[in-house]
Image (cartoon, grey):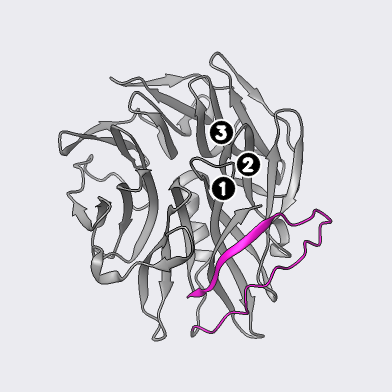
Amino acid sequence: MLYGLAAATMIVGLTTAVGPAQAAPAPQAAVASSGAPPQWKIFYAGRLTEGYLHSVAAPSPSSAWAVGQYQDEDGHGHAAVLRWNGRDWSLVPPPSLPDMKYWYSVSASSAHDVWIYGWNEERAGVAHFDGTKWREVAFPDFPEGAPVSYAEIASVRGGTWLAGETWVSRRVHGGWETTTLPEGVRISSIDARSATDAWIAGTVYSAEEGLQPYTARWNGHAWKPVEMPADDLGVNDVWVQSGKSVWVTGLIPVGEGWTPTVLHWNGKSWKNVRMPDEGQWPLAISGNRGEVWVTGDPAGFAGPPLYWRFDGVTWKTVAGRLPTGGRAETVTGLAPIKGTSRLWAVGSYIVDDGEVAHSFGLVQRDR
């Protein structure tokens, strides 16, 4: 199995189909076949042809951003940045952005402080939106030979980080300060609550223990490892709910399969929060107003996307929605909408034309 940022290569590869772009069905809600009543509403579908959305940020009810990639009518790939203005989602005109082929990660501390990370065939790039315009920001120096393709960005008031698989860079005085991670560590996700409280999560490999989960916490001065259970967990995502509540998703291999797993840190220790095994790969985790949400890569790729919702006691499977004629692929990004109890979710879905499976970007919101 592949985990973390490396696994994103599989996801991106699977969501880009070969063949000419075609129009998608109208975004009418499809009822879940699982019996769980749909509680998500589609806000954007069918307009990013052969595309996907990977990350989303929502600093206010009237401001949200989603990033990914799509193809034009000639089959040329383009980076995608979508903006929510409180009424509609729209594609940001490419000329107003740096020339990238993929935008992979977005984070925002406010409507006037938005960061995106992506790359093209030649280089990786970071851009910042100040509420008026986008400008490219110099990329941080990182260890020679270190992978950069699937980094993630996290931004809060007073703090911005960019995390690669083997390094983490922090925005300092208009530049970047880079920390090289310990030998064997591979980071899959980063999340921050404040300028002095951020977390990275992934795996660490050693000859003695093999592949094990890994987390570290930024305390305002340095990254300090937080010991995790040695249970072979491959980590996908981390969400910092509070100073004493952190959540991690991943998979534990069992025979030829796996067990979807969510771990919770209460400020002192980790607990495995048992969840329904729906045959999914848990991907993104986030939450709002006391509820925890997890998205999954559905087994069988049939029907609408499924979510897990945890109220602190029990898990409930909640069906998302898809355009009629579409089938589920992946929901890879979740973001709480600041000031509300709602969340945005982004990903992609598939439409079969009888010969080729075409992929389209998807944005939906709960309730």
- Label 2–label 1 contact, CB within 8 A: yes
Between marks 2 and 3 in the image, the one whose residue lies nearer the viewer: 2
Q: CA distance from mark 1 to mark 3?
A: 18 Å
In the depicted view, which residue is nearer to us: 11 or 209?
Answer: 11
- Number of residue marks: 3
With 95 as the anchor, is 186 left or right in this view? right
Q: Is residue 112 above or below residue 212?
A: below
From the image, tell me which residue sits under label 3: 248
Examine the rendering and report whether any part of residue 148 can be seen: no
Dot 2 or dot 3: first in sequence order is: 3
Q: Nearer the viewer, residue 5 or 61?
A: 61
Q: Amino acid at mark 2?
A: Trp
Picture quarter containing residue 316?
A: top right
Q: Residue drawn 71% across and 33% down?
A: 311
For mark 1, what is the residue? 343
Q: Amino acid at mark 1?
A: Leu
The residue sitting at 25% across, 53% down in the picture is 127
Question: What segment is highlighted magenta in the picture?
Answer: 21-48
Q: Position of residue 195 (x, y in %)?
A: 33, 27
Q: Is 156 on the left or on the right of 53, as rendered?
A: left
Magenta stretch contains residue 294 = no
**Whether residue 356 is visible:** yes
Element type at mark 2: strand
Mark 2–mark 1 distance (CA, rounded to whole Å): 9 Å
Looking at the picture, how far across and down is residue 308, in whole percent? 69, 44
The residue at 23%/63% (across/down) is 98
Q: Badge 2 is on which residue?
A: 293
Please give left or right for residue 347 compared with residue 140 in the image.
right
Q: Residues within 10 Å of mark 1 (few under 14, many from 20)?
A: many
CB atoms of marks 1 and 3 within 8 Å: no
| Mark 3 burial class by Cα count in 10 Å: few <14, some 14-19, many 20+ | many
